[in-house]
Amino acid sequence: MTSKEIIRVEELMNIREVCKVLGVSPVTVIDLVAAGDLQAYRVLGTKVDKQSVSYDSRGLRFKPTDIREYLSQVLIK
């Protein structure tokens, strides 16, 4: 994402929506973010401690395109 690219908040998914799409638990989504396999955006004012993987999942947001990209990477052919 370039500095000129603006993401509208309405376009971002919350962790519950991502869990539903991927069919996994919030802990799994957080683990994917911590491992660098899934990109997430932190809403201002949300504390993130990457060392202990202690994410306040309410503050994480995801671009639908990032979710689609992740799914294409893990697709078994």
Image (cartoon, grey):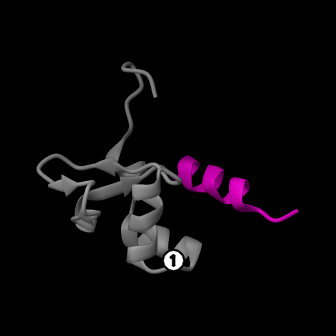
Asked if residue 74 lies in the magenta stretch, the reply is yes
User: Vertically, is 68 above or below 2?
Assistant: below
Q: In this view, does 55 lie to the left or right of 73?
A: left
**What secondary structure characterizes most of the magenta part?**
helix
Q: Does the magenta stretch include residue 73?
A: yes
Image position of 40 (left or right of 57): right
Q: What element carries label 1?
A: helix
Between 2 and 75, the one nearer to me in the picture: 75
Decide: few, some or many residues near mark 1? Use Cα within 10 Å; few <14, some 14-19, many ≥20.
few
Kind of residue at badge 1 = Lys
Over which residues does the magenta segment extend?
A: 64-77
Please identify the quarter of the rendering in which residue 58 is found.
bottom left
**Residue lying at 66% horizontally and 59% vertically, measured from the top left:** 71
Residue 77 percent location from the top left of the image = 88, 62
Residue farthest to the top?
4
Percent x, y of residue 56: 21, 65
Q: Which residue shows up at 39% across the image and 37% down it?
A: 7
Residue 59 in the image, given as x and y percentages of width and height = 24, 59
Query: Which residue occupies the extreme left position in the image?
Result: 45
Residue in the image at 44% along x and 68% along y: 29
Q: Which of 73 and 21 is in front in this view?
A: 73
Circle 1 residue: 20
Residue in the image at 70% along x and 53% along y? 73
